[in-house]
Amino acid sequence: MDAASTDLQQQTLAAARSGDEAAFVALVEPHRRELRVHCYRMLGSFDEAEDLVQETFLRAWKGIGDFAGRSSLRAWLYRIATNACLDALDGRARRVLPHHLSRPSDAGDALPPPRTDLPWLQPFPDRRRDGAGGGSLVEPAGPAAPRDAEPDAIVEARETLELAFLAAIQHLPPRQRAVFVLRDVLGWPAKQTAALLESSLAGVNSALQRARTTMREQLPERRSEWVAAREPSAEERAVLRRYMLAVERADVAAVAELLADDVRTTMPPWTLWLQGRDTVVAALTASWNAGSPNYVGRFRMLPTRANGRPAVASYVRDGGDSTFRAFAIGVVRIEDGRIAEITAFHDSGLFRAFELPASLTG
């Protein structure tokens, strides 16, 4: 930052301290996106992350008069956001996906009632992290040195919004989670992390080692093979187009050609989930058969991105209805040209977060 920019920021900060709300907004608003991501990693919920960013700004506004500038504004906001998240996590159950709760179901199993009482993980729309394009998933510039280079540092930037990562981090107690995110995800040095959490250096280092051990136990074995976050490859885009077209045509055979042998499909808030191509295909056959009691309807699909992966927004209509209504946001993991996993979040409220229409016509 050049001298002129520094002077302007100091003037804006002085105005905010004196009660100028517009000046305060100018100071904090540039940090909204990264704070939203930080809160999402801590909570596993996009909705709650949005609320916690607002809570962070409210607390910051109340305390801006006392901000002494001994740390950067960004570090101060992270301190407030982290403490707000710790308050929100106090006494909360960890967020889950269906395959964390039970064994896979058979294709013929009856669909149980949705479990709206369970704390489900939520997807994160890429465009709400990176801008309208929703493209690269580059980490925000850290407040200090690059990520820990020790052999025990196990997190890569490419995976820190993966659903598997979010599910694993849910196993950490809140303060361990905060230490892990600040140290191994954002690259904060131990001393700065200890200051933010008002903890000792020894306490932070101990919490980090325990958190790393838990994460190794919880993360998938094949995580070293995950593809780095980037724009979808031509192959991935082609697979996604073929999948969307096959679903719109209710072409079960075409979908089957795109599925990996060990594909997994889940659809929170239902606890039922399926494993294996044959099981998934059998379930699709029933749900796309207009004469079946499990018939869902006809589909329209729109492409999007979530958690660094390709995703599809699905809309469904039934009977003589001419309107396709919001049905699910499906996060798609593609490996070796085949769909390895689809996590379909059945929550129409998510369409607003993804900036997608609630219905389609025609």
Image: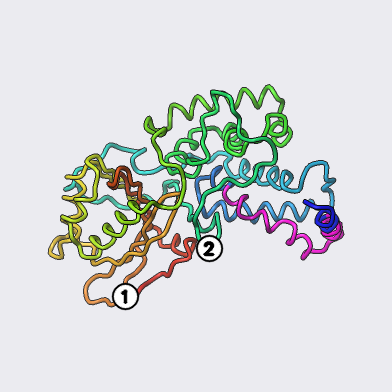
- How crowded pointer 2 is (Cα within 10 Å; few <14, some 14-19, many 20+) is rated as few
The residue under the point 40% across, 52% down is 232
The reply to whether the C-beta atoms of the residues labelled 1 and 2 are less than 8 Å apart is no
Q: Nearer the viewer, residue 331 or 317?
A: 331
Q: Nearer the viewer, residue 208 or 1?
A: 1
Residue 117 position in % (x across, y down): 42, 49
Q: Please provide the residue range marked out in magenta.
A: 10-37
Q: Amino acid at mark 2?
A: Ala
Q: Nearer the viewer, residue 313 or 222?
A: 222
The residue under the point 34% across, 69% down is 325
Q: Does residue 170 appear left or right of residue 71 in this picture? A: left
Where's the C terminus, which quadrant?
bottom left
**Can residue 348 be found in the magenta stretch?**
no
Query: What residue is shown with label 2?
Result: 132
**Can residue 32 be found in the magenta stretch?**
yes
Q: Does residue 198 appear left or right of residue 272 in this picture? A: right
Query: What residue is shown with label 1?
Result: 323
Q: Does residue 202 appear left or right of residue 14 in this picture? A: left
| SS majority, magenta | helix
- How far apart are the alpha carbons under marks 1 and 2? 27 Å
Looking at the image, what colour scheme do you see? Answer: rainbow
Query: Regarding mark 1 in the picture, which secondary structure is present there?
Result: strand
Q: Is residue 37 above or below residue 175?
A: below
Residue 287 position in % (x across, y down): 20, 58
Residue 140 position in % (x across, y down): 61, 47
